[in-house]
Image: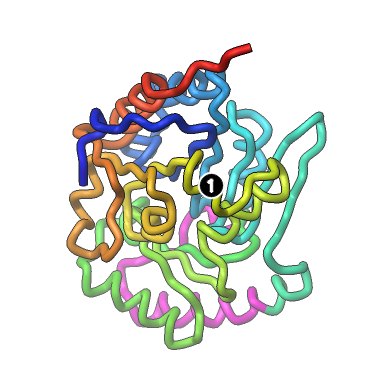
Amino acid sequence: MKTVESFTASLEYLFTDIDDTLTDEGHLGPEAYEALWKLHRSGIKVIPVTGRPAGWCEMIARMWPVAGVVGENGGFYFRYHQKKMIRNFYFDFETQAANREKLDRIQDQVLKEVPGCAIASDQFCRLMDLAVDFCEDVRPLPSDKVQKIVDVFKSHGAQAKVSSIHVNGWFGTYDKVTKSLQILDREFGVSATQAKQICGFVGDSPNDEPMFEYFPHSFAVANLSNFVSQLKSKPSYLASKKGGLGFVQIAEQILQSKTPISY
């Protein structure tokens, strides 16, 4: 991984994780939020790509300086444009309901077999996945218990991804990359090939690995060091600062490298 300061390309879009990438100890600080505004004002379209739920994403798409948001690890994208909320889901509502029944069974098993974990407090506003908390509102669990949660999901044929706070599980072949490429294509006319040239991504944990692998212009904040040994695909650039301040460091370098628009 290279230092952030060695990045020199010009980006038009920036995807970013939220938890522990934009935030610090669960809070979105003024520096990171201002960095989002600076990117927005410069003409760079920011699109958060998060494991957080539909309820959060509705607010983010409407109120943050972003061009859209991909939520629940790729289960959908929301875009608030011209006073209209555009919602695009990977599955129709009938399939979502059927999957929820299966996820409910997984929930019962996880809570029974992994003492100390809990269902994420934001589960009530999720549509596509099940989020199991292993350190956000509970005492941090050891890695073997986190792996046990993952194993339960997989034993039911579900996908499972570990973030910095939750294990998120769902049914379906989608991930953060598939829905990110779809929002680019359907909403902005950017092809998958073009995306590799003009888009970047910022993340911090193993569930960001598909994005690190796909986008050549990929970045991580310094707290990725907690997970480097778990990654087969690493980001191209690493910030020296953690969380929100690391995002600020990355944003500043992206803005410095941006090619001025000529008229």
Specify the farthest residue to the top.
Answer: 263
Amino acid at the residue labelled 1: Ala
Element marked by disc 1: helix
Res. 113 image quadrant: bottom left
Residue 114 image point, x, y percent: 33, 76
Number of residues whose C-alpha sits closer than 10 Å to that of mark 1, classed few (under 14), some (14–19) or many (20 or more): many
Specify the farthest residue to the bottom.
Answer: 155
Is 186 or 192 nearer to us in this picture?
A: 192
Magenta-colored span: 99-124
Decide whether residue 172 is among the magenta residues.
no
Residue 227 image point, x, y percent: 23, 57
Is 35 or 12 nearer to us in this picture?
A: 12
Q: Residue at x 22, y 68 (%)?
A: 143
Q: Residue at x 72, y 49 (%)?
A: 186
Q: Residue at x 59, y 26 (%)?
A: 65
Give the vertical position of 91 relative to 191 (above or below). below
| 65 on left or right of 94 | left
Residue 12 image point, x, y percent: 53, 32
Give the vertical position of 53 relative to 150 (above or below). above
Give the vertical position of 221 relative to 161 (above or below). above
Q: Main secondary structure of the magenta part?
A: helix
| 124 on left or right of 51 | right
Q: Residue at x 52, y 51 (%)?
A: 52
Residue 253 image point, x, y percent: 33, 25
Which residue has dot 1 on it? Answer: 195
Give the vertical position of 31 relative to 250 (above or below). above
| 229 on left or right of 158 | left
Decide whether residue 118 is among the magenta residues.
yes
